[in-house]
Image (tube, coloured by chain):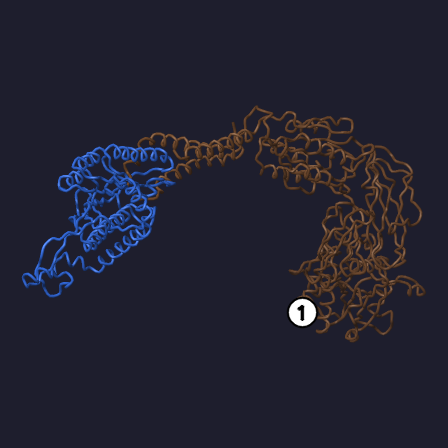
């Protein structure tokens, strides 16, 4: 015999309680003066023996009752016995609801089969057994209400996420660890998708450890799928999405199956409506990706869904992918020219203006980027908030009042691009913008003459956040520049010279972004401005600023969306819906306040696709999108060898449409004796009541 | 002023005695008012002797015939003839101190003795009072003077019990002492050796006395209504008894009733009256019942 709550065996010590009460009662009496003592003494003498025996019987019954109660609480278990009513089993059911579980199995899906298996497990459990149900990403507390468990099983929904089964197993084992039961069983119902068992050795080792105290059942659902085409990349090539401005969309389609697929149609949808002709890829070979290119434009100002879709196959989650883009009517840029020169061509901002608006004069009116050039003296009259970015080009000194305005502007979400030049006085920048406002992440140090002897080249860093082509930069000679000296402020290198020193750094400041270039925007210190790379370089700098706040709108399924909005929205409620799923319930979230702005946080992004968030009091909803996890597209399942290894420590069974007859829990052994003990306790309590009444009656 | 007088004049004793007397008078006269018969019937007043007149004597009692013959003033003195002498013997042992309610057995017994004294003296009969425990502690010789009533009350009121009970020697002693036949009324709980007690009664009966045994009991002694754990403390130096009364209630009742039955049976056998009294019973009712009973038996 064993006990599930051995600690409670100490409760047996409570048999001292009735003894103490008995002894105390013997001491607790009422004193009464009495005259008729002779009759009393005769009566007592006649009854003394009987009263003592009755006292002893009652005391023994009460002690026995307390001892049995303690035993009952300690939950004794008899090995090798079964069929005793009330023997509960603590169970954790982990249902894999990762993206691969959405794969079709005839008329149903792997997840639907997993639900069937979970219900079959539940049906075979003794009544009142505590059951904890968990999906791959979210677990429920254990409950012995099996109706609730059944509804939780049904409530585990399909996601388009990649699952970490080790995490789910740990959670389930922890849940079972807190349970006291004759047997503890953990059911992991999964399709055995190899990617989720990526760290197979670690998972196997952990399963072996858990199996030391818990019976683990690995229930495999589904059968291998032969082919899967999936969209592995969707990249809109637009640095500055604007209304009705065509942009390119690059799409990669990958064949995860074992045989070539011919004539693959790819469709583009903007805001759910087909846009342009289908693109047909002639052939996608096994394990290879093929590209498709679309051109689209955004029909109006605001947020838009750009979706690429394949024909649905047996693994549907990766057949469709959406990104959210925001179109602007105008992008206003303020160019502060520190060296206007005698002629337009001599202006410090001449090349910048042309790079920002790289279209013929007749098209400039319709072009969304609207640069405006001012001198330092003209800054006082400018309202900075109407500009998306401010470029300081070879500005000698930063006026004190402007430094304050500039810092506030960037903190509120604006962008700053700094190009140095011969006029620039580093001390002014370092004092006001670097040290005082911490707006510049680096300090500017004049480069000594010796080291400036030969021209240098610049290359993108490994992260290459602007996506610049290294080949385009290859021929650019940088003759001179200021040194960007790193301090304590956080920043990232975007370009670096061939001598390893930074050429371009970026940093976040409040909601805004800052780029600091080490060379000029004209031809004074380099020949960059007349190279083809200069136009995309400038546009991507601007795009980096403008898209800074929109980048967070596209997340991977399961990631938490954190999107910054105006500070005034903090504290308001937002309702988030899945776009295209009219039955999906909206979820409420409250915008939090962080670093001078409000943040929309949303972590129920399990399904891939677009979401719509309506902020209380705001007329235009915000769109964002979740992309499916690429790791789930692979078709590889656990092999026979791996399942064989797992079989050493866990019970492996297969549940499918054709093999649904697995009888779970058939080999359960051991019975909890609390039910018969409870009956004994009740009977003994009844005996105690009857005896107490019987003994205390008048005699 | 001697000690006895001082005792009599003790304001507290006076108050107690007056209270007792008032109660007794109230009870007895209440009873007599319902009787419609003179309590004085059958009693004669006989001439006793002459005494020379002294200033202050009632001139109504002057014997004018003697004055005419002797020219001296003589007062006629009379002697009341009594029908009987009642000897009241009150048990003043410590066991009589018990009382579950407002009144103890002793207080009830005192009231009963006072009432009887009042009644008897108003009938021009004589009363002697003895209060005893193991022996006679207080004794007032027989007297038919109603002025004696106050002394009886005072003795009753002042008595505080100190000892245990031994009734038999007292009865034997009384049987030996009393020469004139009379009525001996014993007021007690009779918690004593039964055989010795009956011998004492037998002795009194042998001497020709009419014996009335008034047993005063507390209702708790009869009903034994205790619950829980109780430690009974004997009132006469008897060791403590700790028990659960509910467990012995029936046995106690059985023993107690058997004792009373034996006592009653013995009284019947020795032709003496047994009167059972409960301290929760009103005294006038108890007295009325008893006197009615006496009248009926006297014919």
Q: Is residue A613 above or below residue A115?
A: below
How would you rate the neighbour count of disc 1 (Cα within 10 Å): few for under 14, some for 14-19, many for 20 or more? Answer: some
Nearer to the camera, A469 or A50: A50
The chain displayed blue equals: B
At x 50% / y 32%, what residue is drawn?
A: A681
Percent coordinates x, y for residue A72 in the rendering: 52, 33
Chain A's colour? brown
- Closer-to-camera residue (A494/A152): A152
Viewer can see residue A24: no
Measured as percent of width and height from the top left, residue A18 is found at 42, 37
Residue nearest the viewer, comparing A497 with A493: A493
Which chain hosts label 1?
Answer: A
Residue corresponding to mark 1: A431
Where is A243 relative to A377, above or below? above
Q: Position of residue A406 (x, y in %)?
A: 73, 68
Q: Residue furthest top?
A: A80
Q: Quadrant of residue A414?
A: bottom right
Q: Count the marks.
A: 1
Name the one closer to the observer, B240 or A180. B240
Viewport quadrant of the N terminus of chain B = bottom left
- Looking at the image, residue B91 sits to the left or right of residue A533; the answer is left
Percent coordinates x, y for residue A314 in the rendering: 83, 36
Q: Is residue A301 visible?
A: yes
* Res A30 → quadrant: top left
Name which quarter of the figure residue A17 lies in: top left
Does residue B163 appear left or right of residue A151 in this picture? left
**Is the C terminus of chain B in the top left, top right, bottom left or bottom right quadrant?**
top left
Looking at this view, name the residue that lies furthest to the left: B70
Which element type, helix, strand or loop, lies under badge 1?
A: helix
């Amino acid at each position: 015999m064993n006990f599930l709550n051995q600690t409670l065996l100490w409760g047996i010590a409570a048999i001292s309680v009735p003894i103490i009460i008995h002894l105390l009662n013997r001491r607790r009496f009422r004193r009464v003066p009495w005259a008729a003592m002779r009759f009393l003494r005769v009566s007592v003498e006649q009854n003394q023996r009987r009263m003592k025996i009755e006292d002893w019987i009652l005391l023994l019954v009460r002690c026995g009752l307390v001892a049995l109660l303690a035993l009952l609480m300690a939950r004794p278990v008899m090995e090798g016995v079964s069929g005793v009513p009330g023997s509960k089993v603590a169970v954790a059911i982990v249902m894999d609801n990762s993206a691969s579980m959405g794969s079709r199995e005839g008329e149903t899906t792997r997840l639907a089969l997993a639900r069937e298996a979970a219900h079959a497990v539940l049906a075979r459990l003794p009544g009142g057994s505590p059951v904890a149900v968990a999906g791959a990403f979210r677990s429920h507390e254990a409950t012995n209400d099996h109706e609730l468990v059944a509804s939780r099983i049904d409530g585990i929904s399909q996601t388009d996420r990649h699952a970490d089964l080790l995490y789910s197993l740990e959670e389930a084992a922890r849940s079972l660890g807190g349970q006291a039961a004759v047997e503890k069983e953990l059911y992991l119902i999964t399709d055995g998708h190899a990617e989720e068992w990526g760290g197979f050795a670690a998972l196997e080792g952990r399963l072996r450890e858990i199996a030391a105290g818990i019976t683990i059942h690995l229930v495999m659902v589904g059968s291998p799928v032969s082919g899967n085409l999936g969209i592995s990349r969707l990249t809109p090539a637009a640095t500055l999405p604007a209304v009705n401005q065509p942009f390119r969309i690059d799409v990669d389609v990958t064949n995860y199956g074992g045989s070539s697929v011919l004539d693959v149609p790819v469709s583009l949808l903007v805001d759910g409506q087909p846009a342009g002709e289908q693109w047909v890829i002639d052939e996608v070979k096994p394990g290879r990706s093929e590209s498709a290119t679309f051109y689209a434009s955004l029909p109006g100002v605001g947020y838009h869904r750009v979706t690429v879709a394949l024909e649905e196959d047996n693994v549907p989650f990766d057949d469709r992918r959406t990104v959210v883009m925001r179109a602007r009517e105008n992008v206003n840029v303020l160019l502060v020219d520190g060296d206007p020169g005698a002629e337009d061509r001599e202006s410090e901002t001449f090349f910048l203006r042309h790079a920002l608006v790289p279209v013929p004069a007749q098209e400039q009116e319709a072009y969304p980027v609207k640069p405006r050039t001012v001198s330092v003296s003209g800054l006082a009259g400018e309202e900075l908030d109407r500009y998306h970015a401010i470029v300081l080009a070879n500005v000698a000194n930063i006026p004190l009042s402007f430094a304050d305005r500039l810092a506030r502007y960037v903190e509120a979400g604006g962008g700053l691009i700094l190009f140095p030049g011969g006029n620039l006085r580093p001390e002014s920048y370092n004092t006001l913008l670097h040290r005082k406002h911490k707006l510049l992440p680096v300090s500017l140090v004049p480069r000594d003459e010796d080291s400036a002897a030969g021209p240098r080249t610049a290359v993108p860093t490994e992260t290459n956040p602007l996506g610049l082509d290294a080949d385009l930069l290859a021929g650019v000679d940088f003759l001179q520049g200021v040194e960007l000296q790193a301090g304590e402020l956080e920043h990232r290198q975007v370009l670096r010279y061939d001598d390893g020193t930074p050429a371009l750094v970026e940093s976040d400041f409040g909601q805004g972004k800052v780029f600091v270039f080490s060379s000029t925007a004209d031809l004074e210190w380099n020949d960059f401005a007349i190279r083809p790379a200069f136009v995309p370089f400038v546009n991507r700098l601007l795009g980096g600023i403008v898209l800074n706040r929109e980048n967070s709108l596209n997340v991977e399924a399961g990631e938490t969306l954190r999107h910054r909005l105006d500070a005034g929205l903090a504290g308001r409620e937002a309702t988030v819906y899945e776009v295209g799923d009219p039955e999906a319930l909206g979820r409420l979230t409250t915008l939090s306040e962080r670093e001078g702005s409000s943040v929309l946080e949303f972590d129920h992004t399990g399904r891939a696709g677009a979401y719509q968030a309506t902020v209380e009091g705001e007329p235009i909803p915000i769109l964002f999108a979740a992309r499916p996890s690429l790791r789930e597209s692979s078709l590889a399942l656990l092999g026979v060898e791996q399942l064989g290894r797992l079989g050493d420590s866990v019970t492996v069974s297969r549940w499918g449409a054709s093999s649904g007859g697995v009888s779970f829990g058939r080999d359960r052994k051991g019975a909890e004796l609390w039910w018969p003990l409870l009956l004994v306790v009740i009977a003994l309590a009844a005996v105690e009541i009857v005896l107490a009444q019987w003994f205390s009656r008048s005699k | 002023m001697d000690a006895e007088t001082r005792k009599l004049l003790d304001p507290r004793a006076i108050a107690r005695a007056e209270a007792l007397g008032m109660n007794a008078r109230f009870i007895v006269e209440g009873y007599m008012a319902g009787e419609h018969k003179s309590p004085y019937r059958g009693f004669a007043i006989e001439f006793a002797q002459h005494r020379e007149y002294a200033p202050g004597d009632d001139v109504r009692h002057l014997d004018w015939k003697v004055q005419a013959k002797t020219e001296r003033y003589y007062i006629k003195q009379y002697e009341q003839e009594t029908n009987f002498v009642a000897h009241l013997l009150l048990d003043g042992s410590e066991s009589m101190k018990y009382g579950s309610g407002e009144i103890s057995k002793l207080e009830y017994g005192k009231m009963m003795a006072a009432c009887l004294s009042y009644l008897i003296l108003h009938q021009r009969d004589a009363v002697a009072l003895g209060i005893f425990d193991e022996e006679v502690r207080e004794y007032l010789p027989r007297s038919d003077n109603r002025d004696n009533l106050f002394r009886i009350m005072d003795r009753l009121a002042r008595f505080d019990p100190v000892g245990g009970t031994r009734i038999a020697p007292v009865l034997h002693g009384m049987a030996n002492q009393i020469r004139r036949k009379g009525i001996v009324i014993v007021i007690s709980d009779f918690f004593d050796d039964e055989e010795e007690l009956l011998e004492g009664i037998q002795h009194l009966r042998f001497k020709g006395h009419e014996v009335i045994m008034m047993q005063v009991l507390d209702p708790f002694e009869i009903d034994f209504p205790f619950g829980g754990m109780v430690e009974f403390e004997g009132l006469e130096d008897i060791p403590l008894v700790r028990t659960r009364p509910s467990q012995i209630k029936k046995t106690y009742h059985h023993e107690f009733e058997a004792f009373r039955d034996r006592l009653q049976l013995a009284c019947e056998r020795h032709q003496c009256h047994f009167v059972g009294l409960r301290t929760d019973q009103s005294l006038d009712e108890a007295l009325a019942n008893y006197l009615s009973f006496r009248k009926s038996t006297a014919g």
